[in-house]
Amino acid sequence: MTQYAPRQLREITEISQETYRHWRRVLPPLSKVRGQGACYAPGDLVAVSVVRVLVSEVEMRVRGIAPMANDLFEVCRNTPWPTLERGRIDFDMQGGNITFALGSAPPPSGVLCISVPLRPITKHIQARFVDARPTDQQGTLRFPPTPLQASRENARGEDRPTSKGAS
């Protein structure tokens, strides 16, 4: 399973180092990951991106999301990527819980609910994965290519001239 360092999490989810530090203090799932070798799963990238959407687009405070953070991260970590792409996260603001639903399922009725579609988030993360991969381009060759057959014959001594007088 691929793991991501805090720097990679920040770059892929497009949050600043200060934001990351604050969210680590406030969001329990981020505060549990400690040390030099702190690593995050792909589902964590999705969960942090959902938090970023709620903070930047819905203008929620991170402290308001904190009570639901454990459930959010658990759903994002345990749901397969193809299913995440087709789903959404519904935040029941009155009950303080979240549910994962596939895109075609109706949102909860009778409650104040914020739905965050995951397709744009997963597409953005996938695009960042592709951008982050090192390119494997071959550089210019220092020496011209040599045919292998001639090299093999030389190694076996088949190409050596023989003297007529030697028998």
Image: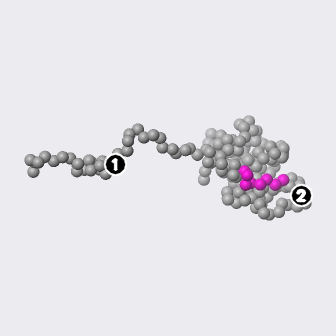
Q: Which is closer to the viewer, label 2 or label 1?
A: 1
Q: Quadrant of residue 7?
A: top right
Residue pictured at 13% horizontal, 46% vertical: 163
Circles 2 and 1, Cβ within 8 Å, touching? The answer is no
Based on the picture, tell me whether residue 118 belongs to the magenta stretch.
yes
How crowded pointer 2 is (Cα within 10 Å; few <14, some 14-19, many 20+) is rated as few
Place of residue 88 in the rendered image (x, y in percent of width and height, measured from the top left): 77, 57
Residue 50 forms part of the magenta stretch: no
Q: Residue at x 72, y 50 (%)?
A: 121
- Give the residues in magenta: 114-121
- Residue position marked by numbered label 2 in the rendering: 111
Spot the residue most to the top.
18
The kind of residue tagged 2 is: Val
Compare marks 2 and 1 and give the one earlier in the sequence: 2
How far is disc 2 from disc 1 in space, using C-alphas? 74 Å
Q: Position of residue 24 (x, y in %)?
A: 73, 42
Q: Residue at x 67, y 44 (%)?
A: 12
In the image, taking residue 91 as reference, residue 159 lies left or right, namely left
Q: Amino acid at mark 1?
A: Pro
Q: Which mark is residue 147?
A: 1
Report whether 118 appears left or right of 7: right
How many numbered callouts?
2
Give the structural element (helix, strand or loop) at label 1. loop
